[in-house]
Image (cartoon, rainbow, N blue to C red):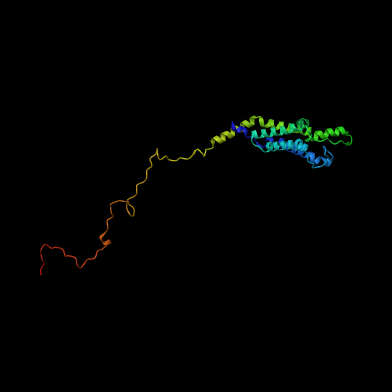
Amino acid sequence: MASVARIPRSRGGVTGVLLILLGAWGGLAPFVGPYFHYAYTPDKAWAYTSGRLWLSIVPGAAALAGGLLVLATAHRAVGCFGAVLAVLGGVWYVVGIAVIPLAVTNGSVSPGAPLSRTVGSLSPATYKLLEQLGFFTGVGVLILLCAALALGRFSVVGVRDASLAEQRDAALAEEPSASSGEGYSVPDPVTQDVTFPAPSSTGQFGAVGSREQSPTAPEQFPTTTSPFRRPPDTGGLSGPS
C-alpha cells in the first residue's frame, strides 16, 4: 500500500531537533571551546586544522543534515535515510579518533591533545575525560541514541498508520480522474448518428436553392403604358364610326 509511506511531519520532530543541536555542537565545539578553556590543542578559538575538519566538522554536518531530514520529511523512506546518515556521523565521532592514526600514518590529521587543568575538585585526568566526552565520544553516543530512536519510529508501521493509509486510499479512489475523462459524456460521431436540422423554408428569403418564389402582387410593382404599344387585335370588327 503506497499510502503507508506517508507519515505526519511531527513523527520525527523531537529526535530531529536533538540531532540538529548535537550536530551543530559537535562541529562548532573545537572552535568555540577555547573561549572557556575547554578544548583540544591548539588552544585557539576558530583555529582550523585538518583534524578538526575530518573528526568534528564532517560528522557534525552528517548529523545535522540527517536531523533536518528527520525533522522536515513527510515520507518514511526519507526519514530513514536521514536517520542512517546521522548514525554514520555518530559512529565516526566514537571511532574516528582510533581509526584516523591507522588510516593516515603521516600524522597530518590529528585531533590534538586535550587540555590539562584543575577545576575545583576535578583532577586533570577527570577534566581530560570530560573533554573527550564533550568533543567526541559522548557526542557520538548521544547522536547514535537519537538516530536509533528516529530510525525505529520511521521503520515501524503502526496500526494508526495503516488506518490512515486505508482512509487516504479510499478517498483517492472516490475522486474522479481528470486524466481519464470520467464524468464527461462526449458523443462519438462514428457510433452515433448526428442529425442536423433542415433549413427553414419559411424565412424571409426562403430556402437556399429553392425554385419557389413568393407571389408578387401586381400593384406592388406597377407598370407604365408605353405610347407605342400595339393595340389589341379585335378580329376585324370595327366599332361604330
- How far across and how far down the image is residue 92, in percent? 74, 32
Task: Say which residue appears at 86% left-offset and 32% top-offset.
Answer: 125
Q: 227 or 86, which lies in front?
A: 86
Which quarter of the picture shows residue 21?
Answer: top right
Q: 135 or 121, which lies in front?
A: 135
Toward the front, the furthest residue is 106
Task: Say which residue appears at 65% left-offset and 35% top-offset.
Answer: 78
Q: Quadrant of the C terminus?
A: bottom left
Which quarter of the picture shows residue 37?
Answer: top right
Task: Say which residue appears at 68% left-offset and 37% top-offset.
Answer: 69
Q: Quadrant of the N terminus?
A: top right
Q: How many marks?
A: 0
- How far across and how far down the image is residue 156, in percent? 66, 29
- How far across and how far down the image is residue 147, in percent? 71, 32
Answer yes or no: is residue 30 visible.
yes
Which quarter of the picture shows residue 111?
Answer: top right
- How far across and how far down the image is residue 223, in percent? 24, 64
The image shows residue 207, relative to residue 163, as above or below, that is below
Answer yes or no: is residue 13 visible.
no
